[in-house]
Amino acid sequence: MSAPQLTYYAMAPEVVAFSTTREGGVSSGSYASFNINPYCGDAPEAIATNRERLCCLLGIDSKHLIMPHQTHHTLTRQITDDFLSLPEEERQALLEGVDALMTDVRGLCIGVSTADCIPVLLYDPVHSAVCAIHAGWRGTVARIVQHSVEAMQHSYGTQPSDLLACIGPGISLAHFEVGDEVYEAFAEAGFAMEPISRREAKWHIDLPHCNRLQLEELGVEAAHIHSAHICTYADSGHYFSARRLGIRSGRIFTGILMR
């Protein structure tokens, strides 16, 4: 049995932070071969096998791998010990319409799914808490990173200056071509457009840099922000890209786990 091939991020010795690649699974077609997202049309039996492989690699029970059903909003859900004791239907209901997860429970792997959108991982080493954020362009405009950091401040006492952050694989400035309405959405939301955009035949937006700037504005130290510098569109052979493969394709899972 082949194991999932992961891209790891060295955030801290006690933290496992990673993004999945397309390798090491059993899904086929545009889902090939490693996809664990149940919301994009892949075969349930393939998803279950892939999920089992990832949990085996991480050394956790399948119940401890937690993924929300994202809807491009800004809701951050706190995952506590009590969450695991809830019936499955209640757990799924709590994960519906959620675009970021946070927890201070060790042994739980929380994560988000992307296929061009930007995954952001946060670790607060002072209060032993982590967060996984899905920042598509809509979530970025709505400042989901800011909402998630504020949620960590409220729940754990997190100080932005203590945070370690990682910006995972996502579409790059070169390939994120947008219409005028998207450019205007960023401008109307108060973003300084010169650092995050450029004009070619159409506007291009730099989503990874936009989220980095938000982290810095919140007070996260620039030296504490790691960027993967992986463009999903340019490297769609190794990472899922909805713009290259279509919406009915697999998703990258970017997760974080405290040992």
Image (spheres, helix red, strand yellow):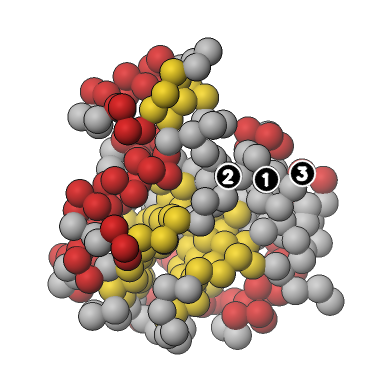
Q: Quadrant for residue 37, please give it.
A: bottom right
Which residue is depicted at the point 44% across and 84% down?
A: 13
Depth check, front residue: 80 or 235: 235
Number of the label disc, if any, that sits on residue 30 = 3
Tell me if residue 84 can be seen.
no
**Where residue 150 sits: x, y (%)?**
19, 58
* Residue topped by disc 1: 235
Q: Is residue 55 left or right of residue 125?
A: right
Q: Estimate the spatial distance between the alpha carbons at disc 3 and disc 1, rounded to whole Å.
A: 14 Å
In the image, residue 55 above or below residue 209: below
Tell me if residue 149 can be seen.
yes
Number of the label disc, if any, that sits on residue 231 = 2
Q: Secondary structure at mark 1?
A: loop
Q: Nearer the viewer, mark 2 or mark 3?
A: 2
Q: Secondary structure at mark 3?
A: helix
Depth check, front residue: 147 or 184: 184
- Whether residues under marks 1 and 2 lie with C-beta atoms below 8 angstroms apart, the answer is yes
| Amino acid type assigned to the residue bearing label 3 in the image | Ser
**Where residue 111 sits: x, y (%)?**
48, 63
Depth check, front residue: 98 or 192: 192
| Amino acid type assigned to the residue bearing label 2 in the image | Cys
| Amino acid type assigned to the residue bearing label 1 in the image | Asp
Categorize mark 3 by other alpha carbons within 10 Å: few (<14), some (14-19), many (20+): some
- Whether residues under marks 2 and 3 lie with C-beta atoms below 8 angstroms apart, the answer is no
In the image, residue 147 above or below residue 104: above
Q: Report the quarter where the N terminus lies.
A: bottom right
Which residue is depicted at the point 32% across and 19% down?
A: 184
